[in-house]
Amino acid sequence: MKLVDEDEYGAYRRVNAEFLKKFVCKESNPNFEVYDSRDNQRRFIAVKSSRLPDDQVLFEGRYGIDFNRAKPGFQEALRYSAELPHALENMTWLANTAFAATTSEEYNLKSSVWDNFYSYIWGTKAKTIWVTPHSGGVNRAPDDVFAYPKTAIDAFTAGVAASCAFNNVSRASERNMIAIHSSSYLGTVVELGGFGIIDEERLAAVATKIETQYHGKAQILARAHKQYFCLTATGWLEHIKNKTGTLNPEELRHTSSVDRRRLELIIKGLELYGQELDEFTLEEFSEAMLTLSKMDVPVISTDYVYPARHVSKLLKVSEKIDQGLLHSALSIECSKPYLAEAPELVTSIILDVKSELFD
């Protein structure tokens, strides 16, 4: 049952009438929307704006904000803006800073939006908060700096998060945040990131149980999952090779840290499927991808690619927990093909994970 409208790339647009049978709107602005269940037990937060700092329409109040990053100080936001668009090649910026700004007025507007967003996450009342920090559309034109902007959308996450919120009927005894993201890289159907807060052994035990329960069901999209990765990865590999002349991550250390990170994620995904690379050539990558065809897709992993510890530090999650403004947090990274083609399956997996950890 579809509960939200998403565009052809999987970006969130709005909830629909079916969703509103159980939820009421708390806030709707050009950057995000917030809905609470009528029993006040669940909250759904979906981002509409772009996560890329130079992808914005200022006069419409639609800003480029990465809500999964730390709010910068004014001078930091100015420096970020001055270095755009080439700051998009620097992981120091992209991995840490929520937005850029050219004036104090722009900074204050974006800062207010960022603060407002988190006012719906931190709090003292028991509630399960389902949030998609990167579900907004991306309209930035491709260029040599960022060749495939649409891949920055956490595609179809809002639909699954809304389904989780809608179908999660257990009463909340604590305030827990569950952030749902999507990945274009080769991995499992879902990956659990504990924000450095949830005990790793507990996560691993839940993963083992879920793997046993869902492994057979998950293979229905195994081919699409691997094909999507191969197509996306090949595009990035060819772009990086043409742009830099190398596919060796170490040789990219002083050129583009973002391209280096992309390569590392491609390589780590292949390693998860038992494919080791030595020469880092296009031919070797292609050969490794060909061997994926007969392999099963693992259902679930923990803290493998996206542990969320870094984001936890940026958002000061531990401090919020100490202040009584949150009990726990979980980050879930999902395969884009499964989100798009099997949302019911992903919803079921996530709700079972949530039940094991928080109910």
Image (spheres, helix red, strand yellow):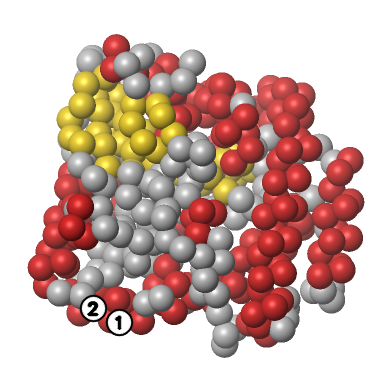
Say whether residue 268 is left or right of residue 179. right
> At 59% from the left edge and 72% from the top edge, which residue is drawn?
259
Hey, which residue is sitting farthest bottom in the picture? 254
Decide: few, some or many residues near mark 2? Use Cα within 10 Å; few <14, some 14-19, many ≥20.
Answer: some
- The answer to whether residue 121 of the structure is visible from this angle is no
Give the amino acid at mark 2: Leu
Q: Residue at x 27, y 42 (%)?
A: 32
- Give how far across and how far down residue 172 sits, in percent: 31, 22
- Using the image, tell me which numbered label, if any, was put on residue 78: 2
Indicate the position of residue 69 as horizontal and vertical percent values: 34, 59
Q: Is residue 46 left or right of residue 322?
A: right
Residue 354: numbered disc: none
Q: Separation of disc 1 and disc 2 at Cα?
A: 6 Å
Provide residue 34's location: percent of width, then percent of height. 25, 34
Q: Secondary structure at mark 1?
A: helix
Residue 68 appears left or right of 275? left
Q: Secondary structure at mark 2?
A: helix
Residue at 89 percent across and 60 percent down: it is: 287
**Residue type, mark 1 in image:** Ala
Q: Tell me how many marks there are.
A: 2
Q: Quadrant of the C terminus?
A: top left
Residue 307, given in percent of the width and then of the height, sits at: 52, 53
Residue tagged 1: 82
Using the rendered view, name the quadrant where residue 130 is placed: top left
Asked whether 298 or 343 is in front, the reply is 343
Using a 10 Å C-alpha cutoff, classify the residue at mark 1 as few (fewer than 14 neighbours), some (14 to 19) or many (20 or more): some
**Residue at point 58% right, 33% down?**
340
Tag 1 near tag 2, CB within 8 Å: yes
Q: Is residue 132 among the parts visible in the rendering?
A: yes
The quarter holding residue 284 reads bottom right
